[in-house]
Image (spheres, rainbow, N blue to C red):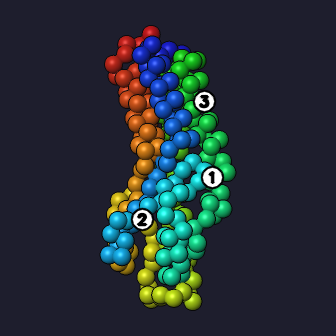
């Protein structure tokens, strides 16, 4: 079984420890601008909470038939802390046990978790933007209001943006460090 270089072990440990930030900073953000809200509205998604202008956004969305946004509508919040904890522990275990196959596993877990999070968010957005109350105050036949997964989208008179917040960027950096370390191990380190 191939061992990791000392530098690789340190990089994997750093990648794992960076993810601790997920417990202290928001992971994702949704921003909205409209003529009546030129300063914008913000919703921050944390590992187990939603903060920002949630009540205002929820009230505005209710006029077009969307559900009120509440923490209880996200069952993911109940287990995200454990998933992130597992990723951190797996990364530290990879650095400690010092085996290349564990680095492969760590990279695959990070990629799978990222993809699963995006798919989950897309499915939530699809449901949230398409399952509208037909008795809402404003009904535009054939119109759906799915927020963007990543990037900017026009929704009636609102411009909505969705993308990583501080914690999301830290996760991306962690994944890039881990994948970069794997590339280093595979292509730049002579086999032991």
* Up-down relation of residue 71 to residue 113 (above or below): below
Q: Which mark is drawn over residue 77?
A: 1
| Residue at mark 2 | 41
Mark with earlier residue (3, 1): 1
- Which of pointers 2 and 3 indicates the residue nearer the eye? 2
The x, y position of residue 114, in whole percent, is 49, 46
Q: Circle 1 sits in a helix, a strand or a loop, which is it?
A: helix
Query: Does residue 181 lie above or below 58 as drawn?
Result: above
Return the x and y of residue 91 as percentages of the image width and height.
Answer: 54, 28
Q: Does residue 79 appear anywhere in the picture?
A: yes
Q: Which residue shows up at 33% across the image and 19% down it?
A: 188
Please tell me whether mark 3 sits on a helix, a strand or a loop: helix
Q: Quadrant of the N terminus?
A: top right
Pick whichever of labels 2 and 3 is earlier in the sequence. Answer: 2
Mark 3 and mark 1: Cα distance apart in space:
19 Å
**Nearer to the camera, 57 or 109:** 57
In this rendering, the label closer to the viewer, 1 or 2: 2
Residue highlighted by disc 3: 89
Q: Image check: 84 left or right of 13?
A: right
Is disc 2 in contact with disc 3, using a CB cutoff of under 8 Å? Answer: no
The one nearer the camera, 129 or 109, is 129
Image spot of residue 152 (x, y percent):
34, 63
Q: Nearer the viewer, residue 66 or 99?
A: 66
The mark lying in front, picked from 3 and 1, is 1
- Tag 2 secondary structure: strand
Q: How many marks?
A: 3
How packed mark 1 is, by other alpha carbons closer than 10 Å (few <14, some 14-19, many 20 or more), is some
The CA distance from mark 2 to mark 3 is: 36 Å
Q: CA distance from mark 1 to mark 2?
A: 22 Å
Q: Residues within 10 Å of mark 3 (few under 14, many from 20)?
A: some
Q: Please report the residue visible at 54 percent of the width from the left and 50 percent of the height from the top.
A: 46
């Amino acid at each position: 079984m191939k061992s990791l270089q000392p530098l690789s072990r340190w990089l994997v440990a750093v990648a794992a420890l960076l993810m601790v930030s997920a417990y202290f900073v928001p992971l994702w953000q949704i921003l909205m601008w409209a003529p009546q809200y030129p300063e914008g509205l913000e919703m921050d998604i944390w590992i187990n909470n939603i903060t920002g202008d949630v009540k205002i956004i929820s009230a505005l969305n209710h006029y077009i038939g969307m559900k009120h946004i509440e923490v209880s509508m996200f069952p993911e919040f109940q287990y995200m802390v454990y998933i992130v904890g597992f990723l951190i522990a797996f990364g530290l275990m990879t650095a400690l046990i010092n085996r290349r196959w564990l680095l492969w596993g760590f990279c695959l877990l990070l990629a799978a978790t990222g993809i699963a999070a995006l798919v989950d968010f897309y499915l939530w957005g699809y449901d949230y933007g398409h399952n509208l109350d037909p008795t809402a105050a404003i009904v535009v036949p054939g119109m759906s209001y799915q927020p963007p997964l990543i990037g900017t989208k026009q929704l009636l008179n609102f411009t909505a943006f969705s993308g990583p917040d501080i914690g999301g960027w830290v996760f991306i950096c962690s994944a890039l460090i881990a994948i970069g370390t794997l590339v280093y191990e595979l292509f730049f380190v002579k086999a032991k």
